[in-house]
Structures are given as C-alpha cells and as structure tokens.
Amino acid sequence: MELLDNLALGFSVAISPANLLFCLIGALVGTLIGVLPGIGPLATIAMLLPLTYHLEPVTALIMLAGIYYGAQYGSSTTAILVNLPGETSSVVTTLDGYQMARRGRAGAALAIAALGSFFAGTVSTMVIAVASPPLARLGLQFQAPEYFSLMLVGLIGAIVLAHGSVVKAIAVTMLGLLLGLVGTDLNSGAERFTLGFPELADGVGFVIIAMGLFGVADILVNLEREHAPAMTAVIGRLWPTQTEFRQAAPAAVRGTVLGSLVGVLPGGSAALAAFASYAMEKKIARDPSRFGTGAVEGVAGPESANNAASQASFIPTLTLGIPANALMALMMGAMQIFGVTPSPRIITEQPAFFWGIVCSMWIGNLMLLVINLPMIGLWVQLLRLPYRLLHPIILLMCCIGVYSLNTSSFDVLLLLLFGLLGYLLLKFGCEPAPLLLGFVLGPLMEENLRRALLVSRGDPWVFVERPISAGLLAVSLLLLVAVLFPALRRKREEALRE
C-alpha cells in the first residue's frame, strides 16, 4: 500500500506540464545524440548542465535522465540501418540488426529493439521502486567507516571493469582522486594543489572536467575518423512476424533481468550489459550459428539489457550516493550542484524528488516508444549531416556553457586543457571514465575517512571492527587480488576484448 502511495506521489510530480515538457525534450535530445555517432550522452549531459541551472532540481534531473536512456533507443536505429552504433551499448546490435536490415527486415528489427527497450524500461522502473526503499533502509545503518568502504568498492569495481590495462585504470583513478583534492581544505583552511592560481581556491569545477573529458576530447577523436555511413535501402514492414515475436520475447525477458543486475554493480554499464546478454543468448541458443546472420534474439536481448542497465544504475546512485558508472557520477555531480545530496535519506527527506524521477522514467520510455518508430525517416536524414558542421557547434556550446558558470576565461582555458588530457588518455588507451568517478568520490571518501578516524581517535582498526565495513573491505580486496592474479587477468582481458 505504501508503494502505491509513493507511486501516486511520483506520478503527480512527473505529469506536471513543466516536467512532462522537459521529459519529452530529454527523450528527443537523447534519441538525437544516440542517432548521431560520436557525441554520446556523457558529453551531451555535460554540455547541457549549465542550461538547466534555472530549472527546478526535479525538472532538470528528469530531462537529464531522459537524455541518458533516450540515447539507448536512438543508438539502435543507426546500428540497425547503417551498421554504425550511435552509442557503445549498441555496438553488439550491429551484429544481427544490420543483417536483418540487409534481408529487408529493418523495420522488424527496429520494432523489436523499441519494444524490448520499452519492456525493459518498464520492468527496471518497477525494480527501482521496489528495491530502493529497503536498500535505503540498509544504508541508514551506514556510518563514516561503511561509506568509505563502500566507495572503495565502487572505485575498485570501476577499475576491474574498465577497458584496457589495470595499471592504466588505477593510474587514471588516482589522478581523479588527486583532482578532487584541489582547492581549500575545509578543516585547516589551507590551499592544496592550486599551483598559485586563486581561481582554483574553490577547486576544479565538475562541469569543466566532464565537458573537457567527454565533450572536447570526443570532438578531437571524431575529427580523425569522420564517418560516411551507407544507407540501408529498404526499411520494410515495421511489425515483426509471430515467429519473430516468439523468438524475441524470451530473449527480452532474459536481457531485462541481466541488465537490471549488471546496472547496479559498481563499474557496471549499459554496454557491459548488452555484451553480456548477447554472449548469454549465443550460449543457450540451439543453433548458435544463426547469430551474426540476423538472429532476432541478438537484437532483443542486448537492446533490453542496455536499457534495463541504464535505469537500474540509478538505484545505488540515488539511495547510497555511489555512482555505478561515469554517467551516474555525472548525474550525481549534477544533483549536488542543484543542492540535492544522494543518500539513504533522500527517500524520506525528499520523497517528491525521488519518486518524481522514478515515475518520469516510465513516462519517458512510453514517449520514446511513441516518437521513435514514426520518426525513423527523420533520424535517417540527420545522418546525412556532415560532422565537420557539427563539431564547431558542439565546441562553441561547450565554451559558452563553461564561461557562463562564473564568467571566467580561466574556466574556458581549463576546459580546453582537460579536453586535451581526455584526448591523450584515449590515444594512450586509458579510459577516462574512472577519472570522473575518482573526482566525484574523492572528496566524499576523504570526508568519511577523516570523520571515521576522528570518531575513533585515530584508530584505523575502526574499518575492520565494524562488520559491514569489514565485509565491504574484503570484497574490495578480493576484486583487486582477482584482477591482479595472472590467469584471471587474462580472462578479464579476453572478455573485454570480446
């Protein structure tokens, strides 16, 4: 009964005219950047953050969340029609979706992807509604030692699941932690790592780092490889056949369950869920040779998994304040800018905010289902827009957005420096996502570490004496040992490569 009351409160917030409008804007923008390869939701949300400062926090977060899960819908369109995924999570959809399109079944593939995503979005919204309150009640038992240990698990999980070398992932995470320490120490009042620049006394701006690493860096990388997609000639009939429905339905259910589980893990992502779903479908198939030639399950499973994971990742972010991936770190940073602190108390202290966002996800998924299929022609035409026209516009938006924060040219210079850093990280095979996670969690880890040691009068055994904290530290140690163990490290590298 309490759940129904909470959902009623959430829908009353989500269906207000302003929230419905910005939910629609978020869904449309998300679909657009999903269709246009090379931009991505991370860069887009980072660029749009300054434009949302005049909105109510719940309205802004509804729009930003719509961009995130809307990108999962849009990226499948180009993956199926032109063999060019707009988002990493739809890379695996190209394997069978494009083959279906070449056989004249592009319309059926698009419908299956959209229906699977809607089903996954609906289920994962219910998972958030059901799982968040008990998780928040558990989180209320957490004190400083538990929070520190939990954040450590999140960082090590991100390192384990990051692409490329473990050593590089650790180095990038440490760099993020150090950047989070720049500014004035709240306890002593001393400036740290400011290099004599008074502009850094308050620390490096979160938006500046996010825009630089994922906006400017993406532009530099994509300028090297401008795409020229070959259009699929015929979209064909949109509605799948009964046989295709029978094959797709179980795969969508399995993908939804798997995606919901992967989404809440530290370091989990929509891309990881999609690849895991495809691997599972191929393993349990009676005839695995069908995969790669146009198997319906190869579209339904991954597309359901990536949408379920993208929404399930809100659970630890909202209820525990632990972002599951880089995009959730960005969302968490956005909430802190709006004066909302994600924590176990958010459900009881700000129920309208929490349940409004949860219910808006279902509404957003319904909007995406309605607007995506009828607008396929428009999205295909947008693919003909040359990237050399898009890149200057995106760069200009980044510079204007950063300058508008503090009307400081120093911030624009920092933006370009972090853009160059992001470009160099990508060129040297380092994933920049752990840096953002380290930057967001670093100050929180330091605060909880200090608080725990202050209460225990400097005794470090406080982290081991408390059972929950000790358990989380044991998980961190096991993850680290597992990834450093030679045989397991090779398995990890093979899985990520696959």
Image: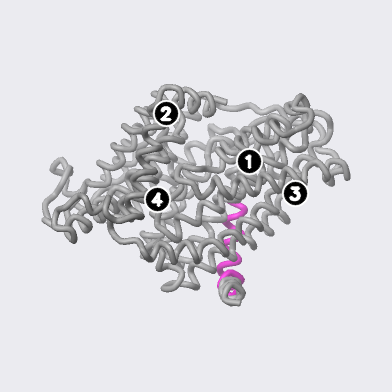
Res 118 label: none
Label 3 neighbourhood size at 10 Å, few (<14), some (14-19), many (20+)?
A: some
Q: Of label 2 and label 3, which has the lower sequence position? A: 3
Mark 1 and mark 4: Cα distance apart in space: 25 Å
Label 4 neighbourhood size at 10 Å, few (<14), some (14-19), many (20+)?
A: many
Pointer 1 with pointer 3, Cβ within 8 A: no
In the depicted view, which residue is nearer to us: 498 or 176?
A: 498
Label 1 neighbourhood size at 10 Å, few (<14), some (14-19), many (20+)?
A: many
Q: Of label 2 and label 1, which has the lower sequence position? A: 1
Res 426 label: 2
Residue for badge 1: 75
Residue for badge 4: 401
Q: At label 3, which amino acid type do we have?
A: Leu
Residue 245 showing in the rendered view? yes
Residue for badge 3: 373
Instruction: Return the x and y of residue 479 as percentages of the image width and height.
Output: 40, 37
Pointer 2 with pointer 3, Cβ within 8 A: no
Q: At label 1, which amino acid type do we have?
A: Ser
Judging from the image, what secondary structure is the residue with disc 1 in?
helix
For the magenta stretch, what is the residue range?
Answer: 12-29
Q: Of label 1 and label 4, which has the lower sequence position? A: 1
Q: In this view, does 117 lie above or below 498?
A: below
Mark 2 and mark 3: Cα distance apart in space: 34 Å
Residue 405 showing in the rendered view? no
Pointer 3 with pointer 4, Cβ within 8 A: no
Q: At label 2, which amino acid type do we have?
A: Leu
Q: Which residue is drawn at 21% across and 58% down?
A: 451
Left or right? Give the position of 445 relative to 319: left
Q: Residue at x 38, y 66 (%)?
A: 140
Q: Is the magenta stretch mostly helix, strand or loop?
A: helix
**Of discs 3 and 4, which sits in the foreground?**
3
Instruction: Return the x and y of residue 389 as percentages of the image width and height.
Output: 54, 36
